Image (spheres, grey):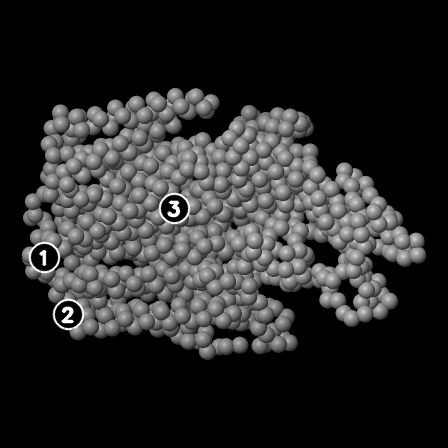
Amino acid sequence: MVVIAAAVGIIISTMSDASTYSTFSIARQQAAAGNSAKVHVVGTLPRDAEKHPVGLEYDPMTNPNYFAFTLVDTLHVAQRVVYRNPKPQDLDKSEQVVIVGAMKDGVFEADQILTKCPSKYVEKDLGNTGPPATAMTSRSTRK
Amino acid sequence: MNLLIGNLGQASVILAFVAAAVAAYGYFQAARGRALGEADASWLRLARGAFFVHGAAVLAVVGCLFNIIYMHRYEYYYAWSHSSNHLPIHFMISCFWEGQEGSFLLWIFWHVVLGLGIMKFNKQWEAPVLAVFATVQAFLVSMILGVVVAGTKIGSSPFILVRDFLTDLPVWKTNPNFVPKDGTGLNPLLQNYWMVIHPPTLFLGFALTLVPFAFAIAGLWKKELTSWVKPALPWTAFGGAVLGVGIMMGAYWAYETLNFGGFWNWDPVENAVYIPWLVLIAALHGMVLWQRRRTGLRTAFTLVVATFVLILYATFLTRSGVLGNASVHSFTDLGLSGQLIIYLAFFSVGAIALLAYRWKSIPISEKELTAYSPELWVFMGATVLCLAAFQVVATTSIPVYNAFLGFVGVKSNMALPADQIQHYTRIQLWAGVLIGILSGVAQVLWWQGKKDKDSVLNALAVPTMLALLGTALTVLLVRYFGHSITPPFVVLLLAGLFGILANVTTLLGLWRRGVTLSGGAVSHLGIALMLLGILASAGYSNTISRNVSGKLISREMSDTDNENNVLLWRNETGAMNGYDVTYTGQYLDVPGVPDYVNTQLLYRTDDEYRAVARADIKGGDKVYFHTGDTLEIRPENTYYRVNYEDKKSGQKFTLYPRAQVNEEMGGLLASPALQRFWDHDIYSHISSVPDPRKETPWSPAIPHELAVGDTLFLNDYFAVFRAIEQAHDVPGVKLQEGDIALQADMIITGEKGREYHAHPVFLLRDRQVGHVPEEVEDLGLRITLDQIDPVKGKFTFAISTTAKDYIILKATEKPFINLLWGGTLLMGFGLLLSMRQRRAAGRTATAPTPASNAGRAGAARPQVA
C-alpha cells in the first residue's frame, strides 16, 4: 500500500512539475494572471537579408551577464527575451531556438536556451547516436 | 575505391544474423522437453557450432569496419562521417563506436564474449541460456543488417557507400567513382580518452544485464525456479559493478569535458542508463536474499526481468529519435523505430507472459519478517531503489507520452520540467536518505548473531550516536564558514554518515571475527560516501567568479544572483571571490611539446594544421623547435591560460580552460579546466571569448616616421626602435638569393613593465616590395615596416591596433567531490568482491555433489546465517 501510494505521489509530482510547450501570447496571459510557471517556447531569430540575426544585444565589456534578443514564436509573435548569462556561442547559426522561462515585467526572462543548429549531430556518451538521415536536415540540441 | 572489404563486411553481417538464428533454434531444440543439463547432444552440437560461426562472423564485421576507418576508406559513409585524416589512432577506436551501427556492434561483441563465458563456466545451463542469448543476438544483428525485404529496409548497415547514401550530390553525375579526400571527422568533443574506455565499459554493463535475464528465463522455462539464482548471482554483481562504474565514468567525463557545470545533468541519455542500473541493483538484492535467506524469489524474478526490459526501453528511447529536442544529445532516427519496438515488445511480452504463467509455482517464504530481520530492511531498500527508478522513468518518458498521444490522435504539448534538478532532487534526495539508513541498518542486522531487540539496538547504538554527533559537528562547521544548511541536507548528511559508520562498524566487527572482507559492506560504504560527495559538491558548489570589482553593472540588473561570470582583460588582474585571477594569453597544443605553446610563438600558415615557429619553443632547458621550424599543431582547441592566486594563502596555480572550434556543436564549445585539491576542485570554464575563427578587425594603419633610437608612444605603451638589421629567418617566407630582407628591432614596454620584442620585416625581391608585419597579441598591436628612406635614414612604420583580447570566465568551487569518485571506486570494488565471494560459495557448494543436480539442492539447504 505504501509503495502504491508513493508511486502515485511520484506520478503526481511528475505531472505537476512538467512544463509545457507554449507561445508568447499564452505566456503573457499567464503572467497577467499571476501564474509564474515556466514554459518552453519554440521560435526563430529574425534575420536580415544576409541571414544575420538582428536585434541581438550583448556587450561583454559593459556586462558579461546580460544578453537580450528578440525571438519570433511559431505563431509569429515577436518578444524581447533576456538571458542573464553570457550569450550562447552557437546562437547566431541556430535554425530554431527553444527557451525556458517566464514573462516578467514585459520581457521574457529565460533560464535556459536550447539551440538547434543546422549542423551534423551531437553526441556525448554511449556512442549512441548515429549518422544523420541526410547531412542537411539533421539537427542538434545542446544546453 | 575498395568495394571488397565492404562486401566482405556485409556478407559477415548476414552470416552473423543467420548463424544467430540457427543457434537460437538449435539451442531451443536441444533444451526443449529435456531436463536441465541433459540437452539433446546433436542439436547442442549444431547450436554450439552455429554460435561459434556467429562469433567468428561478428569478429569479421568488427575487423572490416575497423579496416575501413583505419585505412581512411572515405568511399564508405561510416568512415567519411566519423573519421578524418588527422585523427590519431586511439581516437579511431572512438570513431568505431561513435555511430549507432558501431555501438550496436560493440554490444553484440560483448554478448558473444559473455555467451562463450557461460559455455565455459555454466555448462549445464548452456542450452536454455544460450537459446535466449542467440535470440537477442539475432535481433541486435538485424539492426545493422541493411537488407531490404519486401520493400522494408531492415537495419542500417555500417558498410553503406557515400554514393548510395548521399545520392543527391551533383558530383556523382560527373564522376560516379568519386572518393572524398578527407572525412568530416570525429566530433572534437569526443576526442578524449574517456571516449575510448567509457563506451566499452557501459556496453559491457548493458550486455551483462542479459545474463541474469537469460538465466531467469531458462529457469522459468525449465522449471528450475530456484537453482538459476546461484549461477546468475556472480554475473549480476559483476554487471552491477561494471554498469555503475560505467555510468560514473560518463559522469566524470561530463564533469571534465562539458561545460554544464557538473557531473550529472539529468539528461534523458544519462537517465536511460541510471534507471536500469538502479533496478539491477535492486534485483541483485532480491537474488542475494533468496540465495542466503530463502526469501524474495518472486522479487528477484520480477526485478531481473524488469532490468532487461528497461535496458531495451533505454535502447528504444535513445536510438529511436523519440526524445527529439528533449535531450542535449541529438539522436537521428535511422528508421529503426519499428524494429526497436518489436525488439522491446518481443522480450517484454514474452518474459512477462512466462513469468505470469509460472508465478504460482515460484516458492515463497513462510517466514515472518519482523523489524529485527535484515530481510525486511533489504526489501525496503530494494523498494526504494525501484521507486527512485520509477520517478526517473516517469519523467524521462514525457516525450514518449507526447509521441504516443500524437500517434492516437491527441495533441499533447507536455515538456520536461523547467527545473529538472529541483524536480529530480525532490525525490532522489529522499531516496538517498533512505538508502543511507536502510543499507546501514540492514548490514548491521545481517551480520548480527542474535536477533533480539536488545542486541540489535546495542549494535546500532554506536553508529547512530556517532552519526548524530558528526552531523551536529558538521552543521556547526558549515555555519562557521558562513554557509547555510537546509533541513533536507541535514537529514541527508545524517543518513550518509550513519551509512558510513554502520558499514565501517560491520567491517570492523567482521575483521575482528576473522571473517573475510564483506563485499556488501564495502560497496554500501562506497554508496554512503558517494551520497556525501554529491551532497557537498552539488549542494555547496560555490561560484567564485562574481563581480567584486565594485564597478556597477546597472541596466535592468536587479537580479544580482546571476552575475556568475567575469570579464578578464588580457594581462590585467581581476579580483574574484578570494582569488586574484589573470588571463595571460592563448595557447595551442603542439604534438611533441609537453606544455601548451603560446600562439604568439606560432606563425599560422594556410594549412591550419601547420605553423612556423617565430622563436625557439622551449620546455625547461630543452628546445623542441627552433625559430623557423615548421611544426604540426592541433588547431581545434584554443587554451586560455589563467593564473590564479589565492589571496589568503598566496597559493598559485594555472588553469587552461579551452574553447573548441566545433562546427557540429554550432561553433565554439567551452571545456573546463580543473585544479584539484584533496578537499575541493576549482572548476572553471570560458563562457565567452572573441571568436578565434574570425579575422581580427584592425584599425586603419597610422604611419609613424622614426629614426634608429627614437621612441614611439602608442596609447598606454611605448616602443623603442633600437636597430635595423638583416633578417635571416622570415616566418612563412623562404628567402632566395638576391632577396634583401631587413628587419627592425623594436622593444615595446607593456603592462607592468613587461617587454616585447617585435621584428617587422621589409623584403625586396626583384624590385617588388613585401612586408611581413609583426603582431603583438598581448598588446593588440600590429607593426608593419612600411617604407625605408635610405637617404634621410628614416623608417616609416604603420601601426594598427585592435581591441584588447579578453575572456569571460566562470569559476566554481566543488567541495569534497573526491568523496564521490572515491565512493564510486569503493562501490565497484565491493561489488567485484561479492562477485568473487558468490563464485567461491558456488564452487564449494557444488564440489561435493555431482554437477548435474547441484542446482536443485538449493531449496533444501539450511539457511546460512
Between B581 and B425, the one nearer to me in the picture: B581
Q: Which residue is mark 2?
A: B40
Q: Quadrant of residue B30?
A: bottom left
Disc 2 sits on a residue from what chain? B
B496 in relation to B334, above or below: above
Badge 3, how many Cα within 10 Å: few under 14, some, many 20+?
Answer: many
Q: Looking at the figure, which quarter contains the C terminus of chain B?
A: top left
Label 1 secondary element: loop
Between B41 and B667, the one nearer to me in the picture: B667
> In the displayed structure, does residue A49 sit left or right of residue B294?
right
Disc 3 sits on a residue from what chain? B
Between B303 and B602, the one nearer to me in the picture: B602
How far, Cα to Cα, is label 2 from label 3?
Answer: 44 Å
Question: Is label 2 or label 3 in front?
Answer: 3
Q: Which residue is mark 3?
A: B248
Q: Amino acid at mark 1?
A: Ala
| Co-location on one chain, circles 3 and 1 | yes
Residue B348, how many percent across, how many down? 30, 53
Residue B393, how many percent across, how many down? 37, 43
How far, Cα to Cα, is label 2 from label 1?
Answer: 25 Å
Badge 2, how many Cα within 10 Å: few under 14, some, many 20+?
Answer: some
